[in-house]
Image (cartoon, rainbow, N blue to C red):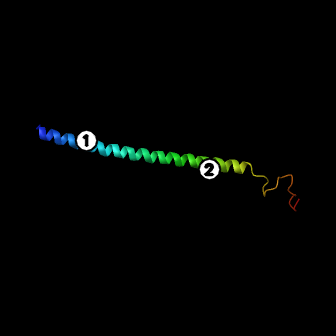
Amino acid sequence: MSEQQLSADIEQLQTKIAFQEDGIEQLSDALANQQNQLEKLQYQVQFLVNKIKNMQGSNIADATEEAPPPHY
């Protein structure tokens, strides 16, 4: 293997590594963004769950408050 071929192979490997590093960085950024979105959604869901649990009254009457149907 000539020195010129070896130099070309090294340059090719360095180029591939640079592209891989860029790809890894982009994936890392995307993962961080998704994690932030997930945390926001979890907070919103928990807020809604708490809000629903704390709702006073409802349009549905209890069985004790409900009059019996007319056929009884």
Specify few, some or many for label 2: CA neighbours under 10 Å numbering under 14, 14-19, or 20 or more: few
Residue in the image at 43% along x and 46% along y: 29
Depth-wise, is mark 1 or mark 2 nearer the camera? 1
Q: Nearer the viewer, residue 67 or 10?
A: 10
Q: Gap in Å between the C-alphas at discs 1 and 2?
A: 45 Å
Placement of 72 over or under 50, stated as above or below: below
State which quarter of the image contains the C terminus: bottom right
Query: Which mark is drawn over residue 47?
Result: none
Local SS, label 1: helix
> Looking at the image, which residue is at 49% across and 48% down?
34
The percent position of residue 24, horizontal first and vertical second, equals: 37, 43
Q: Residue at x 24, y 41 (%)?
A: 13
The residue under the point 85% across, 56% down is 66
Q: Position of residue 65 (x, y in %)?
A: 86, 54
Residue 44 numbered mark, or none: 2
**Disc 2 residue type (three-letter):** Gln
Say left or right for 19 vs 48.
Answer: left
- Left or right of 27 on screen, residue 40: right
Image location (x, y in percent) of residue 36:
52, 46
From the viewer's perspective, tell me whether residue 37 is left or right of residue 56: left
Which of the image's four quarters has the N terminus? top left
Residue sticking out furthest to the bottom:
70
Say whether residue 62 is left or right of residue 4: right
Label 2 sits on a secondary structure element that is helix
Pointer 1 residue:
14
